[in-house]
Image (tube, helix red, strand yellow):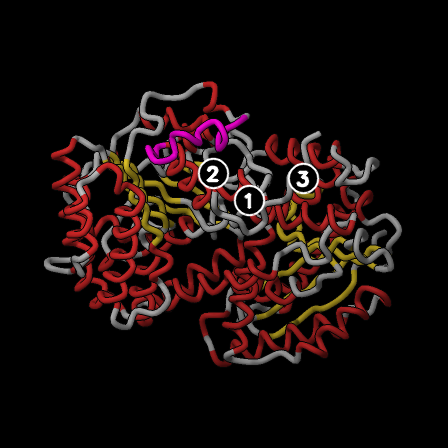
């Protein structure tokens, strides 16, 4: 009987997955589709979507040096029964440029050193195909570019097709862009920049090229002469090529249950329902907006591993390794050394407050235009911080995909707000407990309101309804005792905040909340505040009658809170009677 497959959490090498009996979600059926496209392809996907595993699989499939291992590596996979004529016909060159991304001092030297190691490895792998004299010449050449030219000449003479795969082609250039600024990036990718010189070799040297990364910035600067057909990032036929579909996840969980790794009475559908708001909801093609959304691969493995090891959900639904990803927001906000930073912060604040934003998605742009409004918004999408929600005329509404990414926004915004007025987090945690267990919500609300006023006195831009909502969201999200659902539809309306007790982890939580947050201008009269107060009363009563609220808040006392600000000052903070 075959051993149960292990969970491949953190493993990105296809051969390792197959040799060590790790679970693999079959994506080999996309290989013929890729072959039918251009010989030169370029794909963008966010991090943690299985990019490295996929290109590693491609490398093993096309490598002539692994022809004798095809049936072992691809046993039981779709492509084993549907091989293409290009199977195991190429000599492969594979670069992983993330290895060069740590720091940019003396970058050309580091780049040459890494590429030289790759080219020397190429010679050792394929030495049986070449003359010994040629192999010695390549190994004895110190410059990686010269090594590639030697290989190019000899491979063409011998009639050997070459296939280039570059994983994270844009990684170290994005580091340069954020740390070194546009001038350093321009020197690297323009005119006689060494990185651009390498790209000049690629099209002439390789029969096929596959580049994969997280942003389109570098490609535009490096490949101005290349055909636009390279870019398949928004092609609908490749929407599900990376990431997991709902069917993929359900099949995986049933496999582990059927093999005794998940308890027999485990409710897989309940697990799917729990994971969905945290890990799901990605879409990469407008034509697929109505199709099933995609899951983040790493987060599914993280959740599954907890269920297998401990027979329960992880106490923290966000892997600590993902939590640090909000630094991407900081990098994007600070890119180009702060030029037009306030404009970018306004975009981030709007997204954090409303959950979405309209844009014209840019498929490529040069580095010197990276701070343009639509380019910056597009970068948020490419980094996985937004996803396609719907089309609005000629534009796309992009939304925060899920709770994992929401936490990144809110963590970033808290750091941003703390620069102006720091909140005592220990005291705030104590007040969260009072709110959850004793129903004493006033201290928590009053502390956030005080911090909002202090921030407003420093930053005029914080005033306004969107910014108020964003501020409250950033700190409400810290309350892990609750599932904070902003802008949820209840009884044909949209509540500002629904705080649902996380009973699965904290069954002792005794109080739940619906909060309506209102804003009027600093010059508003008392009559306008009274009007907003009455409006909030009516909305809260209507929301409290929703079937979702009654079901999810069962066993707790439901509080209906109205909070009204006049400018930076909290004018009303009261509980509405349910009637």
Residue displayed at 17% across by 41% down: 131
The numbered mark at residue 492 is 3
Does 122 appear above or below 450? above
Q: Nearer the viewer, residue 180 or 497?
A: 180
> Is the C-beta separation of discs 1 and 2 under 8 Å?
yes
List the residue tagged with mark 2.
Answer: 242
Q: Is residue 302 above or below residue 244?
A: below
Residue 117 appears at what percent x and percent y? Answer: 29, 56
Say above or below: 497 vs 14. below
User: Observer-nearest residue: 251 or 238?
Assistant: 251
Judging depth in this view, the residue of 471 and 281 nearest the camera is 281
- The numbered mark, 1 or 2, whose residue comes first in the sequence reads 2
**Number of marks:** 3
Residue 491, given in percent of the width and then of the height, sits at 71, 40
Name the residue at 81% across, 40% down: 263
Which badge, 3 or 2, is on the more N-terminal residue?
2
Of callouts 3 and 1, which one flags the residue occurring earlier in the amino acid sequence? 1
Q: Residues within 10 Å of mark 1 (few under 14, many from 20)?
A: many
Dot 1: element: helix
Q: Which contiguous range is marked in magenta?
A: 62-75
Residue count near mark 3 (Cα–Cα under 10 Å), binned few <14, some 14–19, many ≥20: few
Residue farthest right in this picture: 555
User: Residue at (50%, 49%) from the top-left corner?
Assistant: 48
Residue 559 pos. (x, y %): 80, 58
Please give the residue where the numbered disc 1 appears in the rendered image.
297
On whether residue 69 falls in the magenta region, the answer is: yes
């Amino acid at each position: 009987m075959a051993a149960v497959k292990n969970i491949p959490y953190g493993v990105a090498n296809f051969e390792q997955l197959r040799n060590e009996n790790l679970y693999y979600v079959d994506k080999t059926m996309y290989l013929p589709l890729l072959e039918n496209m251009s010989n030169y392809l370029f794909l963008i996907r966010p991090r943690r979507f299985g990019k490295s595993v996929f290109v590693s699989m491609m490398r093993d499939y096309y490598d002539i040096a692994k022809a004798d291992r095809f049936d072992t590596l691809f046993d039981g996979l779709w492509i084993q029964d549907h091989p293409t004529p290009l199977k195991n016909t190429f000599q492969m060159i594979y670069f992983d440029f993330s290895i060069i991304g740590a720091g940019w001092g003396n970058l050309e030297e580091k780049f040459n050193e890494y590429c030289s190691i790759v080219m020397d490895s190429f010679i050792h792998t394929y030495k049986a195909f070449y003359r010994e004299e040629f192999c010695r010449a390549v190994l004895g050449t110190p410059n990686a570019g010269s090594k590639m030219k030697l290989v190019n000449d000899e491979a063409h003479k011998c009639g050997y097709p070459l296939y280039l795969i570059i994983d994270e082609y844009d990684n170290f250039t994005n580091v340069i862009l954020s740390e070194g600024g546009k001038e350093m990036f321009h020197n690297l990718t323009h005119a006689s920049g060494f990185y651009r010189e390498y790209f000049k070799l690629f099209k002439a040297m390789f029969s096929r090229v596959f580049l994969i990364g997280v942003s389109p910035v570098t490609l535009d600067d490096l490949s101005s002469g290349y055909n636009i057909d390279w870019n398949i990032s928004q092609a609908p036929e490749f929407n599900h090529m990376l990431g997991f579909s709902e069917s993929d996840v359900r099949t995986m969980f049933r496999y582990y249950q059927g093999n005794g790794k998940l308890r027999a009475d485990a409710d897989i559908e309940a697990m799917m329902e729990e994971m969905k708001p945290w890990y799901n909801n990605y879409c990469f093609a407008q034509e697929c907006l109505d199709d099933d959304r995609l899951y983040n691969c790493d987060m599914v493995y993280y959740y599954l591993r907890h269920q297998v090891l401990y027979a329960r959900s992880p106490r923290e639904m966000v892997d600590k390794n993902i939590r640090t990803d909000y630094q991407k927001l900081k990098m994007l906000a600070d890119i180009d050394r702060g030029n037009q930073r306030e404009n970018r912060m306004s975009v981030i604040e709007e997204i954090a407050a409303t959950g979405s934003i309209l844009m014209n998605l840019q498929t490529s742009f040069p580095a010197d235009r990276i701070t343009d409004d639509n380019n910056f918004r597009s970068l948020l999408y490419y980094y996985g911080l937004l996803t396609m929600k719907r089309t609005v005329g000629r534009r796309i509404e992009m939304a925060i995909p899920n709770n994992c990414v929401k936490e990144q926004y809110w963590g970033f915004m808290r750091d941003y707000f703390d620069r102006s007025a720091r909140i005592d987090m220990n005291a705030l945690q104590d007040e969260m407990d009072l709110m959850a267990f004793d129903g004493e919500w006033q201290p928590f609300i009053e502390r956030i309101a005080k911090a909002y006023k202090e921030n407003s006195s420093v930053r005029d831009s914080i005033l306004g309804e969107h910014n108020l909502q964003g501020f409250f969201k950033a700190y409400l999200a810290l309350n892990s005792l609750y599932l904070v659902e902003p802008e949820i539809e209840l009884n044909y309306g949209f509540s500002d905040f629904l705080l649902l007790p996380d009973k699965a982890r904290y069954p002792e939580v005794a109080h739940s909340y619906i909060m309506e947050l209102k804003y009027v201008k600093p010059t508003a009269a008392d009559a306008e505040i009274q009007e907003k107060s009455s409006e909030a009363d009516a909305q809260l009563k209507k929301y409290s009658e929703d079937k979702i609220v009654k079901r999810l808040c069962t066993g707790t006392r439901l509080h209906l809170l109205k909070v009204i600000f006049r400018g930076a000052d909290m004018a009303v903070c009261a509980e509405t009677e349910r009637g």
